[in-house]
Image (cartoon, rainbow, N blue to C red):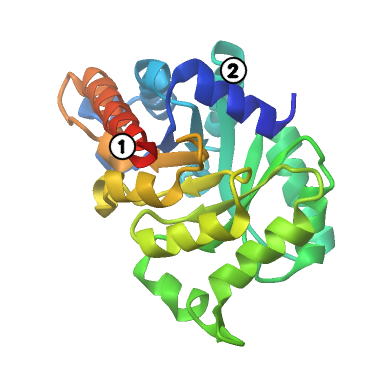
């Protein structure tokens, strides 16, 4: 099954556009886990189990694991997700971008070592740096386009013949890179007008990974109105900190489940309103 097929099934089967980002900060783990050798794995595993009924997938951020030498934990978690929740999307958030030979190794890392369904990449170095990912015809390649951080405007809003760079990227990916139909774009919920322009540019079929709700303050209704396709779908709306750290007490896993359910329900209400 290709990434796009798996994502469509996940949207339908779970009735959810929510993706949970696994960005585990060791300084914010519950105290009973922070001091244990397996605490990082247990925290993420229990978050996965608690939130799985409400999501279309999980997005582990590699930096939070590699910064503390915990790549083996990330590997275990990816195996766990694929075994216990094989119908949910597993996306590695790596934002890789390097020359072809190095990109080939990064593609092996994402798709062979971690067996991710999709990976995020940076388009700045052009097609040859993306080609090793694109050559994996069944895997998702999610390209940074209009990111949710304030500094994204430094380059992404630059005008090229009257067209902002982020729209140039969107058109390039849609028309030139998406030969296998497995590409997507990262577009932040913090910029709903730009999100709407990207959706208009790429049409209904391309999925959008949308960070920026929750802790970053993106508005769910505005996001759905701007980014949903004509079927009220088409997005993976990511939330990380607001779900991971919904509670710092003994009820942290239960609190994350409640936060995920509430976020999913808010998204579903907004997506229905967006197509009415």
- 90 relative position to 111: left or right: left
Q: Secondary structure at mark 2?
A: loop
Residue beneath the point at 53% across and 30% down: 73
In the figure, 189 relative to 256: above or below?
below
In the figure, 45 relative to 201: above or below?
above
Residue 88, quarter of picture: top right
Residue 180: % across, % down: 80, 43
Q: Check residue 273 in the rendering and tell me which mark sits there, or answer none.
A: 1
* Residue at the outermost bottom position: 161
Q: Is residue 35 visible?
A: no
- Quadrant placement of the N terminus: top right
Residue beneath the point at 61% across and 62% down: 170
Cα–Cα gap, marks 1 and 2: 27 Å
- Quadrant placement of the C terminus: top left
Q: Which residue position holds label 2?
A: 87
Residue beneath the point at 61% across and 87% down: 161
Q: Secondary structure at mark 1?
A: helix
In the figure, 10 relative to 17: above or below?
above
Q: Is residue 233 visible?
A: yes
Residue 98: % across, % down: 72, 64
- Pick whichever, 242 or 200, lies toward us: 200
């Amino acid at each position: 099954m290709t990434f796009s097929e798996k994502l469509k099934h996940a949207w339908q089967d779970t009735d959810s556009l929510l993706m949970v980002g696994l960005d585990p900060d060791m300084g914010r783990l519950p105290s009973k886990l922070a001091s244990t050798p397996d605490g990082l794995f247990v925290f993420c595993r229990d978050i996965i189990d608690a939130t799985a009924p409400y999501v279309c997938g999980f997005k582990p951020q590699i930096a939070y694991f590699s910064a503390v030498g915990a790549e083996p934990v990330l590997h275990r978690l990816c195996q766990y997700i694929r075994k216990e929740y094989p119908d949910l999307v597993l996306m590695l958030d790596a934002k890789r971008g390097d020359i072809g030979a190095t990109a080939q190794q990064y593609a092996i890392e994402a798709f062979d070592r971690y067996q991710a369904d999709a990976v995020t990449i940076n388009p700045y170095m052009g097609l040859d740096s993306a080609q090793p990912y694109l050559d994996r015809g069944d895997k998702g390649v999610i390209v940074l386009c209009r990111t949710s951080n304030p500094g994204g405007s430094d380059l992404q809003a630059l005008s090229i013949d009257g067209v902002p760079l982020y729209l140039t990227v969107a058109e390039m990916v849609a028309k030139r890179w998406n030969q296998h139909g497995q590409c997507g774009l990262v577009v932040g919920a913090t910029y709903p007008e730009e999100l709407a322009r990207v959706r208009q540019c790429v049409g209904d079929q391309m999925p959008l990974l949308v960070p920026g709700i929750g802790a970053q303050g993106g508005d769910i209704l505005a996001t759905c109105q701007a980014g949903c396709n004509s079927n009220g779908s088409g997005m993976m709306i990511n939330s990380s900190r607001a779900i991971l750290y919904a509670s710092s007490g003994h009820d942290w896993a239960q609190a994350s489940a409640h936060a995920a359910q509430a976020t999913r329900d808010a998204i579903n209400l907004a997506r229905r309103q967006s197509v009415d």
